């Protein structure tokens, strides 16, 4: 039984003693650059995958089956396939990492709380990740794309997201971002919501606040500095947004 979390080949944490039987394991795999994720059952020696992950959550088969019992039918059916000598993927083509999944992974990679509480925090995030995996599968199979109909469109939407995150201290307007990404404003607005399940600036707001929470936990910078580095026009605006999301003002957060 056990679960371990790995980022860029480095162990992040082991939430439980990890002793995969005969080398077999189930992995949540994600490539953060390509914005793709999947679940893989791998018997013994690892085989070639559709994508090379830079983030993974690796389960012993027993631990995954225990977790899958609380999931929906798609996860339970996948758990039944996790046996024998055949590698099995949850989906044939990897799914897109949307905003909630990105934020969940970010919180795992930037944990700044007490070390004694880290395993419990990570276990909670792993459960959330599996719920998001199921939800991602359901959305991919029930919603037909209306606005992002080509690989080029999707690549432009992802480029816009990446540009936004690297300029969050002074973000462009929607019109400017559309011009930078090389698509029209309507397609950017609708396509972003379709791919990431959030509006452009709703996505930015959530990422900013998650980063602020991490910075506050580290206690290395004053609240005002954190607010301005993340692009907030005023401390009051930052405080109101932070309290609305987390239920406590940033000065009282610990």
Image (tube, helix red, strand yellow):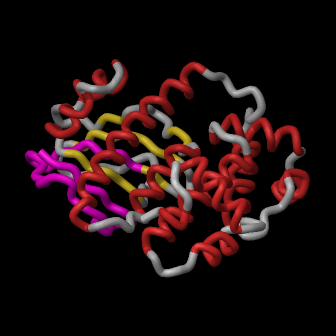
Q: Is residue 241 left or right of residue 174?
A: left
Location of residue 113 in the rendering, given as x and y in whole percent from the top left corner: 34, 65
| 131 shown above or below 73 | below
Location of residue 188 in the rendering, given as x and y in whole percent from the top left corner: 80, 44
Q: Quadrant of the C terminus?
A: bottom left
The answer to whether one can see residue 117 in this image is yes
Location of residue 169 in the rendering, given as x and y in whole percent from the top left corner: 72, 70
Q: Quadrant of the N terminus?
A: top left
Q: Is residue 129 left or right of residue 13?
A: right
Q: Is residue 27 magenta?
A: yes
Q: Nearer the viewer, residue 84 or 232?
A: 232
| 153 shown above or below 238 | above
Q: How many marks?
A: 0
The answer to whether one can see residue 167 in this image is no
* Residue 144, picture quadrant: top right
* Residue at image coords 35%, 21%: 72
The residue lying furthest to the bottom in this view is: 220
* Residue at image coords 27%, 50%: 58
| 51 shown above or below 90 | below
Q: Nearer the viewer, residue 170 or 133?
A: 170
Q: Is residue 28 magenta?
A: yes
| 89 shown above or below 138 | below
From which residue to which does the magenta span run? 1-29
* Residue at image coords 45%, 33%: 92
């Amino acid at each position: 039984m056990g679960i371990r979390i790995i980022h860029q080949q480095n162990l992040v944490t082991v939430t439980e003693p990890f002793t995969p039987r005969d080398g077999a394991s189930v992995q949540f795999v994600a490539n953060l650059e390509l914005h793709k994720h999947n679940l893989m059952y791998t018997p013994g020696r690892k085989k070639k995958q559709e994508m090379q992950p830079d983030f993974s959550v690796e389960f012993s088969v027993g631990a995954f089956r225990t977790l899958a019992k609380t999931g929906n039918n798609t996860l339970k059916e996948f758990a039944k396939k996790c046996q024998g000598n055949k590698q099995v993927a949850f989906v044939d083509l990897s799914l897109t990492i949307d905003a909630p999944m990105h934020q969940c992974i970010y919180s795992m990679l930037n944990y700044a709380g007490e070390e004694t509480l880290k395993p419990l925090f990570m276990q909670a995030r792993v459960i959330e990740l599996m719920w998001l995996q199921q939800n991602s599968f359901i959305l991919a199979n029930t919603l037909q794309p209306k606005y992002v109909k080509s690989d080029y469109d999707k690549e432009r939407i992802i480029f816009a997201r990446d540009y936004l995150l690297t300029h969050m201290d002074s973000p462009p307007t929607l019109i400017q971002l559309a011009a930078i990404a090389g698509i029209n404003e309507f397609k950017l607005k609708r396509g972003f919501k379709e791919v990431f399940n959030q509006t452009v600036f709703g996505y930015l707001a959530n990422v900013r606040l998650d980063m602020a929470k991490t910075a506050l936990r580290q206690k290395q910078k004053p609240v005002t500095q954190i607010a301005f580095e993340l692009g907030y026009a005023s401390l009051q605006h930052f405080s109101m947004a932070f309290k609305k999301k987390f239920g406590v003002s940033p000065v009282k957060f610990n």
